[in-house]
Amino acid sequence: MRLIRYGYTNPMEEMLRNFINHENLNEDNGEKNCYVPKSNIAEKDNQYEIEIAAPGLSKQDIKIGIEDDVLTVSSEKEEDSEVQYTLKEFGYGNFERAFSLPEDVDQENISASFEDGILTISLPKKEVEAAKKEIAIS
């Protein structure tokens, strides 16, 4: 089973929509801004690893939780709204990302670290023993 991002939207459709509407990717049309950080997901032999780019945030700004086999990463930090940018290509702010966890993740031993603006969440796989079954010959 693969680790699948929960609530996935096609990035090409979003980019095209924003280009046509001349919208900033992180604007929400006057409503509360919502920043969507980029993420990488890797599957290794004994664990899955999620990396989330979170520039401008500290580990105290980030919350991680699990409910109903969904891992949620969120932050509530507002950007300085008094700064007037001539060009703005990156930012930070409120966000929430959710990831559906596969059945083989050991949820009790999930760990996270934050270094150089990258949040790394390690999701160890459960030890799966091969089921042995003896079949009687009739």
Image (spheres, helix red, strand yellow):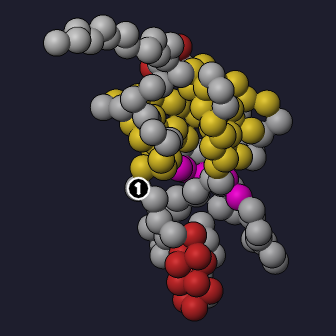
Q: Amino acid at mark 1?
A: Gly
Per the image, the residue denoted by label 1 is 7
**Residue 102 appearing in the image:** yes
Rendering coords of residue 68 (x, y %): 30, 31
* Quarter of the rendering occupied by the N terminus: top left
**Residue 121 appearing in the image:** no
Left or right: residue 107 compared with residue 124: left
Rendering coords of residue 9 (x, y %): 47, 65
Is the residue 59 above or below the residue 21 in the image? above
Left or right: residue 69 compared with residue 113: left
- What's the residue at 45%, 20% (across, down)? 107
Rendering coords of residue 100 (x, y %): 42, 41
- What's the residue at 64%, 49% (across, down)? 39
Q: Which quadrant would residue 71 be assigned to in this image?
A: top left
Give the residues in magenta.
Answer: 91-95
At numbered mark 1, what does the secondary structure look like: helix, strand or loop?
loop
Q: Residue furthest bottom?
A: 20
Is the residue 86 above or below the residue 97 in the image? below
Is the residue 23 above or below the residue 72 in the image? below
Q: Which quadrant would residue 80 be assigned to in this image?
A: bottom right
